[in-house]
Amino acid sequence: MPTSPTSKIASQFPETTSLTIHVFPWIETPTGRFLGKGRVELLEKIIEHGSISKAAKEMGMTYKKAWDLISSMNSQSVKPLVLTQTGGGGGGGAVVTEEGKLAIALFTGLRQRLDAFLQEENRRLQAAMLGG
């Protein structure tokens, strides 16, 4: 019985049970990265805290880094994803717009579909490595 190309490849790898496929998606526009795991997490933290500085602190990033990410997303989007309010008696704040919430949902759905695809591909990889 002839050997398959997959079994020839499998014999080149060490410890076949330790192999796992990983993919880290992001969405780009012609001007650069628009959405990715960190940016979506930042949006979610802003929803949770109503504050860019609190969201940044919880994520272990500087306020400037968080603001740069928000500015980048807002400048690439037709409508802003985050709106800010300046100080006052109760201090400033930030709100994720409906467009921002849609962006979170878009990316989350993409990640869920990609994760399901990767689970199947990892099963195929394991089967191929075990000679199946």
Image (spheres, grey):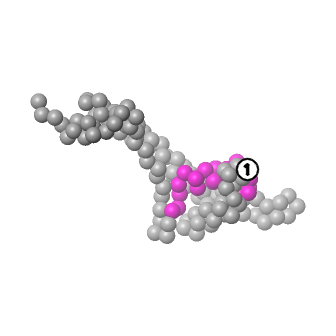
Q: Quadrant of the N terminus?
A: top left
Please identify the residue farthest to the right as the structure is shown.
89
Please identify the residue farthest to the left as the structure is shown.
1
Q: In front here: 113 or 55?
A: 55
Identify the image quadrant of residue 97. Answer: bottom right
Q: Is residue 126 left or right of residue 49?
A: left
Please tell me which residue is depicted at 59% across the width and 58% down the height of the picture.
Answer: 99
**Image coords of residue 74 (percent x, y):** 60, 65
Residue 117 versus residue 42 in the image, above or below: above
Magenta part, dominant SS:
helix
Please tell me which residue is depicted at 66% across the width and 50% down the height of the picture.
Answer: 59
User: Is 49 in the magenta?
Assistant: yes
Please tell me which residue is depicted at 58% across the width and 66% down the height of the picture.
Answer: 72
**Image coords of residue 24 (percent x, y):** 47, 50
The range drawn in magenta is: 33-54
Q: Quadrant of the C terminus?
A: top left
Q: In front here: 115 or 88?
A: 115
Say which residue label 1 marks: 49
